[in-house]
Image (cartoon, helix red, strand yellow):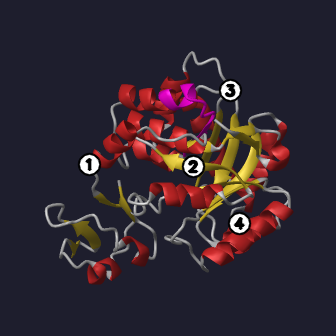
Amino acid sequence: MQYRYLARTGMRVSRLCFGALTIGPLQANLPLVEGARIIRTALEAGVNFIDTAELYRTYSYIREAIRGYQGEVIIASKCYAYTSQGMQDSLELALRELKRDYIDIFMLHEQESILTIRGHWEAIEYLSQAKKKGLVRAIGISTHHVEGVLGAASVPEIEIIQPLVNLSGIGIKGGNIQDMLAAIHNAAEAGKGLYGMKALGGGNLLERPEEAFAFILSIPEFASVAVGMSTEEEVAYNTCLFSGKAVPEEVKAKVRRQPRRLHIEEYCCGCGECLAKCSSGALRLNEGKAVVDHQLCTRCGYCSPVCPDFCIKVI
């Protein structure tokens, strides 16, 4: 496994970050023992960086995975709190459920711009105090927005930025791929540590994984890339690619055979844009939200890029 430093934080992270969303109740909903085993497999393969969030409800998986593990584990989490008390509650929940004395990186989840960041200033001030007490090592944001990256780059208190970017630009808000890459470069110039997310476009680039990963690994400003994994075969596949090794053909075959399905997040706004894009008639609106008929769905992923809130994924 290859490693890089997250800018000025002094944290040396693996190029592959374990994205914990996929194992939890919002997606694969693996049993605790199985999900913890998948994370532990990644740790033993050299992955030392785990990305999670309060929303994902995966703290218990991580706690069990790192129990008794002797190597270094760097954990990033995030929440939507915008008040001091809300952020305190979220940080204390993470510390309690992970059974840790500190969280390496704690972030504001899905920030849109400098205005959004300023609207969460109480939460940032709380994290700054928590950092002084040793409860947090670094403060950051995650964002799908070009303006989110640019805004965070201008805020001294924010040390880490996790932007969305991928080969096809799926899910990028407020600009295109080139706009996001320019914003990422700007943030790196400002001394921010960066790690990417959604390299596979929420599963919509699963037919082009090597091309998609080659693209995101070529972004020089990224220390690491968070990738969701829910099977040991996916861990083996990704750790090979991120280590610069050839993926064994039997591992490729197992990953290709893994069943996939279209997943629509609970926060779907019911705009109906996806229905117009679905040529198989697999999508419909029910009680103001999009739902999928899995018997009709071909998992082509054409519906995902038109979703304004990036809530349609192939998992």
Question: What residue does disc 3 label?
Answer: 72
Q: Nearer the viewer, mark 3 or mark 4?
A: 3
Question: What residue does disc 1 label?
Answer: 259
Please, what secondary structure does the residue beneath circle 2 have?
strand
Question: What residue does disc 4 label?
Answer: 117
Most extreme residue toward the bottom is: 276
Query: What is the spatial separation of the Cα atoms under label 4 and label 2, in whole angstroms?
Result: 22 Å
Residue, x 80% and y 56% (percent of image)?
192
Residue, x 66% and y 58% (percent of image)?
218
Up-down: is 304 above or below 23? below
Query: What is the spatial separation of the Cα atoms under label 3 and label 4, in whole angstroms?
Result: 31 Å
Question: What residue does disc 2 label?
Answer: 226
Q: Which callout, 3 or 2, points at the residue further toward the start of the chain?
A: 3
Of the residues shown, which amino acid type is indicated by label 2? Answer: Ala
Up-down: is 68 above or below 220? above
Please, what secondary structure does the residue beneath circle 1 have?
loop
